[in-house]
């Protein structure tokens, strides 16, 4: 059964607010859970300063991944 079309904008917005939520929206449940756990760890690491570098980098990658995964899902559905 084909997956429903995904809105890349919605995937990115969900990941903007909660890292990993866009991946879950895209159907990548395990990846989304891993991203939520990693975001929590990197957020906690801000207490020892390294998190101020790791969390923003991970957050940007999370947005990029959610958006592009949704686009790839749609391209497969459209038959490109």
Image: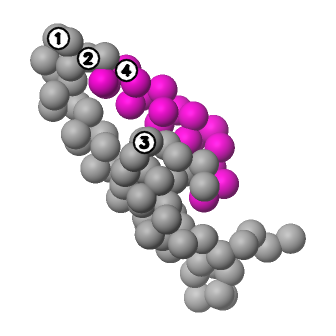
The tag earlier along the polypeptide, 2 or 3, is: 3
For the residue pair 41 and 78, the one nearer the viewer reads as 41
Q: Hey, which quadrant is residue 32 in on the image?
A: top right
Q: Hey, which quadrant is residue 75 in on the image?
A: bottom right
Against 65, residue 7 (above or below) is below
Q: Say few, some or many: other residues with alpha carbon within 10 Å of mark 1 (under 14 / 14 to 19 / 20 or more).
A: few
How far apart are labels 1 and 4 at the CA level?
Answer: 12 Å
Q: On the image, numbered disc 3 is attached to which residue?
A: 19
| Mark number displayed over residue 48 | 1
| Mark number displayed over residue 13 | none
User: What is the x, y in percent for residue 13?
Assistant: 42, 58
Q: On the image, numbered disc 2 is attached to which residue?
A: 45
For the residue pair 39 and 17, the one nearer the viewer reads as 17
The tag earlier along the polypeptide, 3 or 4, is: 3
Q: Residue furthest front?
A: 17
Q: On the image, numbered disc 4 is attached to which residue?
A: 41
Left or right: 73 with respect to 42? right
User: What is the x, y in percent for residue 52?
Assistant: 16, 28
**Magenta stretch: dominant SS?**
helix
Q: Where are the magenta residues, as a range?
A: 26-43
Q: Are marks 2 and 4 in contact (CB under 8 Å)?
A: yes
Left or right: 62 with respect to 30? left
Q: Is residue 66 visible?
A: no
Q: Are marks 2 and 1 in contact (CB under 8 Å)?
A: yes
User: What is the x, y in percent for residue 3?
Assistant: 74, 69
């Amino acid at each position: 059964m084909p997956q429903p079309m995904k809105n890349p904008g919605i995937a990115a917005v969900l990941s903007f607010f909660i890292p990993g939520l866009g991946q879950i929206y895209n159907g990548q449940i395990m990846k989304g859970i891993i991203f939520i756990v990693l975001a929590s760890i990197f957020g906690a690491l801000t207490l020892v300063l390294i998190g101020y570098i790791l969390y923003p980098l991970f957050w940007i990658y999370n947005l990029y991944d959610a958006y592009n995964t949704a686009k790839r899902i749609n391209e497969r559905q459209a038959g490109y």
